[in-house]
Image: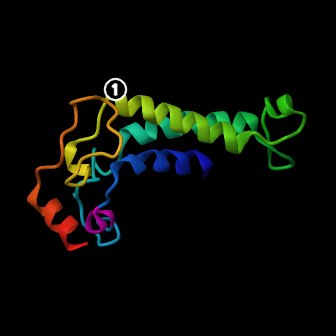
Amino acid sequence: MSHWRWIFRTTWRRGWYSPDDLQVFTRHRRGGIYWFTAGFDLRALAAWFPAVVVGMLFSAAPPLLTGPWAGVAGGIDLSFVSAGLIGAVIYTVLLVAFPEPATVYGPQGPRVPLRANRITPNPDPAVANVEAAR
């Protein structure tokens, strides 16, 4: 879970979330500003898979799972830390290489732009209306 948590925390830089679009799946609909590619954020998945593998390699949870690198820190389970760091680093690199569309940001744009002049504030009037209602 740590790897997914850190990938999600990396998105704090958005500074804004659309509550309606976060609930698309629970309302049995498709689409929304977070739908990305067929409902998946491929950047997040590409960071999640290696983070899971590294976390399992460092796992020290006998009898369930003991990874081959479990003894590196003298029996301390480094799976949580290693998976989280790997997930956050890979996701950040992928966000720089393949930026998110401007529609996922609020009317002010991202809190922390990863590339100068690549992402402009969201021009969508619906986003501005939701932000003004807060």
In the shown orientation, is residue 86 left or right of residue 115? Answer: right
Exactly how many numbered labels are in the figure?
1
- The image shows residue 126 at horizontal and vertical percentages of 12, 63
Residue 108 vs residue 68, the one in the foreground: 108
- Boundaries of the magenta span: 18-22
The quarter of the picture where the C terminus appears is: bottom left
- The answer to which image quadrant residue 124 occupies is bottom left
Query: What residue is rendered at 39% in x and 37% in y?
Result: 43
- Does residue 20 belong to the magenta stretch? yes
Residue 111 sits above or below residue 128 on the image: above
- Local crowd size for mark 1, using a 10 Å CA cut-off: few (<14), some (14–19), many (≥20): few
Magenta: main secondary structure equals helix
- The image shows residue 34 at horizontal and vertical percentages of 29, 53
Residue 40 sits above or below residue 18 on the image: above
- Does residue 67 belong to the magenta stretch? no
Query: What residue is rendered at 24% in x and 47% in y?
Result: 109
Residue under circle 1?
97
Residue 114 sits above or below residue 26 on the image: above
Quick one: SS at disc 1?
helix
Question: Outermost residue toward the right?
Answer: 74
In the shown orientation, is residue 95 left or right of residue 5? Answer: left
Query: What residue is rendered at 68% in x and 41% in y?
Result: 81
What's the amino acid at mark 1? Ala
- The image shows residue 14 at horizontal and vertical percentages of 34, 49
Q: Which colour scheme is used?
A: rainbow
In the shown orientation, is residue 16 left or right of residue 102? Answer: right
Query: What residue is rendered at 43% in x and 28% in y?
Result: 93
- The answer to which image quadrant residue 42 occupies is top left
Residue 34 vs residue 105, the one in the foreground: 105
